[in-house]
Amino acid sequence: MTLRRDGSGLLEGPIKQAVTWEIKGNELCIKMGVMIGTKCLTGVAVKSGFQTFHHRDAAFLFTR
């Protein structure tokens, strides 16, 4: 996953999907198109980057 400072990004997997993202309070919200919609993950700053959580379980760790 690549997130650019301008709020755009790219999700790479079996299929590449353009995304847009924004920070809402302590949540990272990623919009992945009409079919998937928007997913928001709660996050906190950690020493190595930004740790997100989904239903209290660690989800993604974003680093530079």
Image (spheres, rainbow, N blue to C red):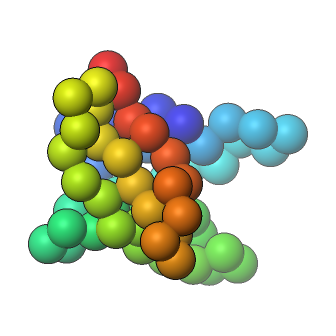
Residue 62, quarter of the rendered image: top left
Tell me: residue 54, above or below residue 63: below
Q: Is residue 6 visible?
A: no
Q: Relative to residue 47, is residue 15 depicted above or below?
A: below
Q: Is residue 36 visible?
A: yes
In the image as oriented, which residue stretches furthest toward the right? Answer: 14
Left or right of residue 36: residue 24 = left
For the point 85% across and 39% down, which residue is it?
Answer: 14
The N terminus, quarter of image: top right
Q: Quadrant of the C terminus?
A: top left
- Residue sitting at x 47%, y 33%: 2
Q: Seen in the image, is 51 located left or right of residue 46?
A: right
**In the picture shown, does residue 13 fall above or below 64?**
below
Residue at the extreme left: 25
Q: Is residue 15 found left or right of 43 in the rendered image?
A: right
Foreground: 44 or 16? 44
Task: Provide residue 15's location: percent of width, then percent of height.
Answer: 80, 43
Above or below residue 62? Residue 35 is below
- Exactly how many numbered labels are in the figure? 0
Q: Quadrant of residue 16?
A: top right
| Along the viewing direction, whichever of 2 and 62 lies nearer the viewer | 62
- Of residue 41 and residue 46, the one placed in the foreground of this image is 46
Left or right of 59 on screen, residue 20: left
Q: What percent of the width, then of the height, locates residue 21?
A: 35, 58
Name the residue: 29% across, 25% down. Answer: 48
